[in-house]
Image (spheres, rainbow, N blue to C red):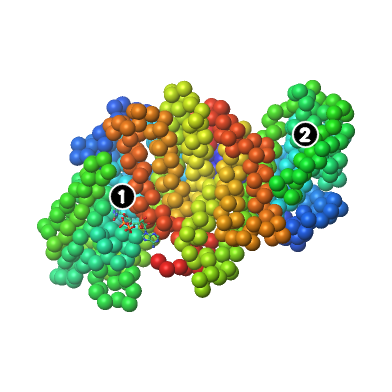
């Protein structure tokens, strides 16, 4: 067992740290869940990409550094320790890109990935529908064959950042009558500004348009935008869902930095003893998450697939994130009520963690049935 | 950076597990001193204490990761006796500036001929120990024995108090030795939690109510999923602490492992129903140990305070 990074990885860390020290905006960008903030964050993605820091783990051909999983973890530690902005390109980078690496065509990768890396094209995930949340496979939006592509109809909802994003990816029913709901689905990409698309922003708890409804009315999607084989959409989409719950959506670096900030806040408030245990738990949790990630990375590099452990991960980070922010707001006392602080923004964001990326109830079912081997119950 | 146990360490765990399964620890706990002593010799021969004893004194150490591996297995099998305290005695003796006591006592500890305990202030199972170290007013003493034997909540433990007098073996107590006790306790607690989870999963898979296994009810599943999550995130803390031996990492591991084990104990009891509440059912041996280990060598609250008392900022950079 070893926790020391190789000299080459440390050199990578130093290089990242120096770049971030020189580039991270001195004044925090406005919230990326607003139109103004979205633009500012898009520009930040471009700045990252200019020196190939936006997607360090990708192949160089698409704008990355071929850095591998361990260096990605190192980069993320530095990124959040430097107080760098949240990533508006997240959905595309952590969900669509891994899918395209595994299931896309060479043409799709060459066309889609470089502008994703630079923030020129921001992607939204269009999976959920009004009638298909946890039971995602019950979705009813349709894709019907037409000359050179597909005509898409239906409604997607809760699509993060779709209010200002450029394109989206989602599942559509392409075969109406199949024995099982997971069959006959096709995974495709579409343009949020194509004719027939209407995007209606939805205000989240604090009113910011963090997600949106997407109405689709005879929207044309060319064949080149189908990911994998038509009808195989479920399998293809699920291979990426593990990425979302696993490490890539919430890197340990983010929580290490947040725990550091919480300790600073606690010290600044005179280290009140009634919050000591919760602050300590935040420090302990961040360290646990970091070490869990190192172990997962080591197994992954040995060729083991990530598998249902990603559900453990999801439950852990989402509960952790809320506990950390609740502690911060309690420490702030009366000021904890103020909505225009980083802690408040983080709190509102954290509250959704147990709901998206597969609710924690669904994740606990996966842990119980697939990791502990308990009998399947009624769903 | 390769944060995984080596194949040798995994083999070590597997062989200990097999040996302890065959040893039937529940009957050892319920048996007499002779049975405990026999088990003690076997675990020592298997190399459980050697990682805590330096090579110079006929051990294999210091190898804290191997020690943690071994103590997870001791916890999984609810092995009785002052196992953590023997490790602490070894760490204390090895750290003394004067080599005399170490030369005299450590080879016996490594070989399993000597059972040691440490009174600070209680000496766990001192009535069964050959060597009773006592921490008194910043000094380390070899006590002439113990008195006042009291039962613990855990039937596998007895709480004793060192007798006054004896031989003063050092005028100062090497404080960092206590990190070895915390680390071993954390490992033992994790093992206790893992055993409780395993046994409960087996139980709810077999126990039928309303015509189906109770393990198919979602309320049951979710409690077990939470137990699994807590234990699986305590595990890397434990091994990370074994790698660094930094006091703060050890404190974090102790707090997390004991909280996870204790929460798992509560879940295990609830999901077993009344049978779990009986002394004759073996589960009770792990349930009560989870409670006892929680406060041994630093309660969760004390450990959390230690996590914050060190310079805690920039955890990322320390990795
Ligand atoms: C901030 C935010 C961002 C999001 N971003 C996106 C996005 O970008 N793209 C996208 O496609 N979707 C997105 N979503 C939607 C998200 O994926 C869904 O909210 C989620 O799948 C849950 O579906 P639901 O909201 O319809 O809740 P429901 O499925 O109606 O669930 C409500 C409650 O019932 C529980 N429940 C349901 N079924 C079961 C069961 N079998 N067992 C136990 N409990 C059950 C759930 O766990 C939950 O607690 C986002 C949601 C939020 C809050």
Foreground pick, B120 / B155: B155
Foreground pick, B208 / A157: B208
Neighbor class of circle 2 (other Cα within 10 Å; few <14, some 14-19, many 20+) is many
Q: Which residue is mark 2?
A: B119
Quadrant of the picture in which ligand 1 is shown: bottom left
Give how far across and how far down residue A333 sits, in percent.
38, 29
Q: Is mark 1 within 8 Å of ligand 1?
A: yes
Give how far across and how far down residue B79 sits, in percent.
74, 51
Tag in front: 1 or 2:
2
Tell me the distance, in whole angstroms, between the alpha carbons under discs 1 and 2: 57 Å
Give how far across and how far down residue B246 sits, in percent.
61, 33
**Marker disc for residue A91:** 1
Q: Residue at x 56, y 27 (%)?
A: B309
Q: Of all residues shown, which one is farthest toward the left?
A: A195
Q: Residue at x 14, y 56 (%)?
A: A197
In this rendering, does residue B201 appear at all? yes
Q: Taking A320 as reference, is B285 left or right?
A: right
Q: Residue at x 78, y 51 (%)?
A: B43
Question: Which corner quadrant of the image does residue A32 belong to?
Answer: top left
């Amino acid at each position: 067992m070893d926790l020391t990074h190789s000299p080459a990885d440390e050199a990578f860390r130093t290089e990242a740290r120096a770049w971030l020290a020189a580039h991270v905006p001195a004044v925090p960008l406005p919230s990326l869940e607003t139109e103004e903030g979205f633009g500012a964050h898009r520009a930040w993605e471009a700045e990252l990409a200019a020196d190939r820091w936006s997607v360090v783990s990708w192949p160089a051909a698409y704008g990355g550094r071929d850095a591998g999983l361990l260096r990605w973890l190192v980069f993320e530690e530095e990124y959040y320790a430097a107080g760098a902005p949240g990533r508006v390109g997240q959905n595309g980078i952590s969900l669509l890109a891994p899918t395209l690496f595994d299931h896309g065509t060479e043409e799709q990768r060459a066309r889609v990935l470089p502008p994703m890396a630079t923030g020129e094209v921001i992607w939204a995930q269009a999976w959920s529908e009004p009638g298909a949340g946890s039971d995602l496979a019950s979705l009813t939006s349709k894709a019907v064959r037409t000359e050179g592509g597909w005509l898409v109809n239906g409604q997607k909802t809760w699509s993060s950042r779709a209010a200002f994003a450029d394109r989206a990816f989602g599942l559509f029913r392409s075969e109406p009558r199949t024995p099982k709901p997971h069959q006959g689905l096709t995974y495709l990409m579409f343009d949020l500004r194509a004719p027939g698309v209407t995007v209606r922003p939805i205000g989240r708890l604090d009113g910011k348009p963090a997600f949106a409804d997407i109405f689709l009315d005879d929207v044309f999607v060319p064949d080149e935008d189908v990911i994998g084989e038509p009808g195989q959409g479920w399998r293809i989409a699920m291979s990426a869902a593990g990425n979302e719950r696993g490490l890539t959506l919430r890197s340990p670096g983010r929580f290490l930095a947040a725990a550091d900030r919480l300790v600073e806040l606690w010290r600044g408030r005179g280290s009140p003893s009634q919050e000591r245990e919760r602050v300590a738990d935040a420090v302990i949790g961040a360290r646990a998450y970091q070490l869990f990630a190192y172990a997962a990375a080591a197994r992954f590099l040995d060729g083991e697939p990530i598998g249902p452990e990603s559900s453990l991960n999801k439950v852990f980070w989402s509960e952790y994130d809320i506990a950390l922010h609740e502690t911060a707001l309690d420490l702030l006392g009366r000021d904890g009520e103020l909505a225009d602080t980083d802690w408040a923004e983080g709190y509102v964001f954290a509250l959704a963690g147990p709901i998206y990326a597969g609710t924690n109830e669904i994740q606990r079912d996966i842990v119980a049935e697939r990791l502990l081997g308990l009998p399947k119950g009624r769903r | 950076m390769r944060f995984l146990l080596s194949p040798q360490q995994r083999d070590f765990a597997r062989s200990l597990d097999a040996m302890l399964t065959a040893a039937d620890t529940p009957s050892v706990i319920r048996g007499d001193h002779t049975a405990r002593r026999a088990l003690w010799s076997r675990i020592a021969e298997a190399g459980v204490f050697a990682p805590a004893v330096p090579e110079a004194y006929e051990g294999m150490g210091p190898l804290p990761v191997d020690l943690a591996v071994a103590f997870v297995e001791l916890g999984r099998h609810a092995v009785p006796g002052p196992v953590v305290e023997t490790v602490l005695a070894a760490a204390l003796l090895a750290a003394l500036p004067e080599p005399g006591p170490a030369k005299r006592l450590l080879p016996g500890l490594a070989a399993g001929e000597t059972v040691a305990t440490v009174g600070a202030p209680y000496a766990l199972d001192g009535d069964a120990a050959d060597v009773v170290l006592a921490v008194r007013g910043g000094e380390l003493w070899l006590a002439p024995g113990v008195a006042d034997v009291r039962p613990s909540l855990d039937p596998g433990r007895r709480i004793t108090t060192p007798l006054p007098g004896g031989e003063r073996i050092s005028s100062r107590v090497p404080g960092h030795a206590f990190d070895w006790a915390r680390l071993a306790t954390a490992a033992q607690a994790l093992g206790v939690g893992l055993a409780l989870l395993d046994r409960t999963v087996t139980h709810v898979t077999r126990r039928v109510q309303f015509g189906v296994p109770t393990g198919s009810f979602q309320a049951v599943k979710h409690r077990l999923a939470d137990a699994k999550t807590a234990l699986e995130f305590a595990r890397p803390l434990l091994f990370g602490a074994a790698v660094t031996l930094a006091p703060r990492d050890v404190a974090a591991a102790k707090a997390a492992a004991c909280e996870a084990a204790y929460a798992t104990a509560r879940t295990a009891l609830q999901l077993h129903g009344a049978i779990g509440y009986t002394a004759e059912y073996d589960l009770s041996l792990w349930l009560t140990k989870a409670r006892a280990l929680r406060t041994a060598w630093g309660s969760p609250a004390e450990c959390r305070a230690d996590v914050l008392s060190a310079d805690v900022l920039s955890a990322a950079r320390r990795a």
